[in-house]
């Protein structure tokens, strides 16, 4: 069973359907006990960083997420859930994140329209079993106004250009994160979900 973390924000329904489409057993939950029992954790999200961290704290999920990830449990953050992986965000002030990946989330400063919305391509920065079907130039679907600046660039899995280059996916040990929506990115997105389930959560 994979635990789909429900903290009151995000597109949980579409993420759940995408995982179930490729054969995963997924439980939507906000209970710490379910996170401890799960084979892997999925943290989606749409909305503001400060509200997300507040909701996670109110449900007493922050410590259990950190502990389970530290013990090696596979973890996937999607969109806002990806940004929450980092140390902090500048959105609406300065807010601490989960601190699982070193770096800070900041707003786009570009002449291009913000939010960054629609299809955009990626450049593969390193080999990883989850991204084995992805090549330079493959497209994924994005909706976001903020992006992370990594302290350790070896964590970067994909990079995307939108006025500035930014890390659009990370992979570090048992931790994965996608700024784009794999559940809305057709076959390439489903291949990432399938590989995470089959190769990381096996």
Image (cartoon, helix red, strand yellow):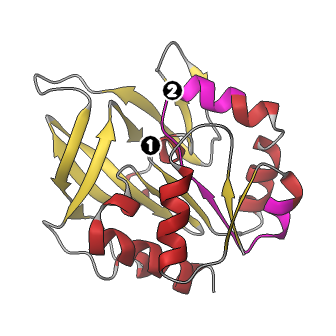
Q: Quadrant of the image for the C terminus? A: bottom right
The answer to which image quadrant residue 37 occupies is bottom right
**Residue 73, relative to residue 202: is it above or below?**
above
The x and y percentages for residue 149 are 38, 38
The x and y percentages for residue 148 are 40, 39
N-term-proximal mark, 2 vs 1: 2
**Residue 127, relative to residue 96: is it above or below?**
below
Residue at the extreme right of the image, as rendered: 33
Mark closer to the observer (2, 1): 2
Q: Quadrant of the image for the N terminus? A: bottom right
Residue located at (44% from left, 46% from top): 79
Q: Residues within 10 Å of mark 1 (few under 14, many from 20)?
A: few
Q: Which residue is mark 1?
A: 151
Report if residue 115 is visible in the image. yes
Residue located at (40% from left, 62% from top): 183
**Which of the numbered marks, if any, corresponds to residue 48?**
2
In-image side of 137 versus 62 (left or right): left
Residue located at (40% from left, 73% from top): 192
**Residue 165, relative to residue 111: is it above or below?**
below
Residue located at (44% from left, 50% from top): 152
What's the CA distance linking mark 2 and mark 1?
22 Å
**Residue 128, relative to residue 88: is it above or below?**
below
What segment carries the magenta color? Answer: 34-54
Under tag 2, what secondary structure?
A: loop
Under tag 1, what secondary structure?
A: loop
9 or 93, which is in the foreground? 9
In-image side of 39 versus 121 (left or right): right
**Which of the numbered marks, if any, corresponds to residue 192?**
none
The answer to which image quadrant residue 121 occupies is bottom left
Q: Is residue 21 magenta?
A: no
In-image side of 143 versus 67 (left or right): left
The x and y percentages for residue 52 are 61, 32
């Amino acid at each position: 069973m994979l635990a789909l973390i429900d903290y009151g924000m995000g597109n949980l329904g579409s993420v759940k359907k995408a995982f179930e489409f490729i054969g995963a057993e997924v439980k939507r939950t906000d209970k710490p006990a379910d996170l401890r029992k799960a084979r892997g954790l999925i943290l989606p999200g749409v909305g503001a960083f400060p509200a997300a961290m507040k909701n996670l704290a109110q449900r007493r999920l922050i410590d259990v997420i950190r502990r389970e990830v530290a013990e090696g449990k596979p973890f996937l953050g999607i969109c806002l859930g990806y940004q929450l992986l980092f140390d902090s965000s500048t959105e609406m002030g300065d807010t601490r994140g989960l601190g699982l990946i070193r770096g800070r989330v900041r707003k786009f400063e570009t002449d291009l329209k913000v939010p960054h919305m629609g299809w955009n391509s990626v450049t593969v920065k390193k080999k990883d079993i989850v991204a084995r079907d992805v090549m330079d130039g493959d497209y994924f679907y994005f909706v976001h106004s903020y992006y992370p600046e990594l302290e350790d660039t070896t964590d970067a899995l994909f990079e995307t250009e939108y006025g500035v280059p930014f890390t659009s996916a990370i992979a570090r040990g048992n931790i994965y994160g996608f700024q784009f929506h794999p559940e809305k990115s057709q076959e390439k997105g489903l291949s990432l979900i399938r590989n995470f389930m089959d190769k990381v959560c096996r």
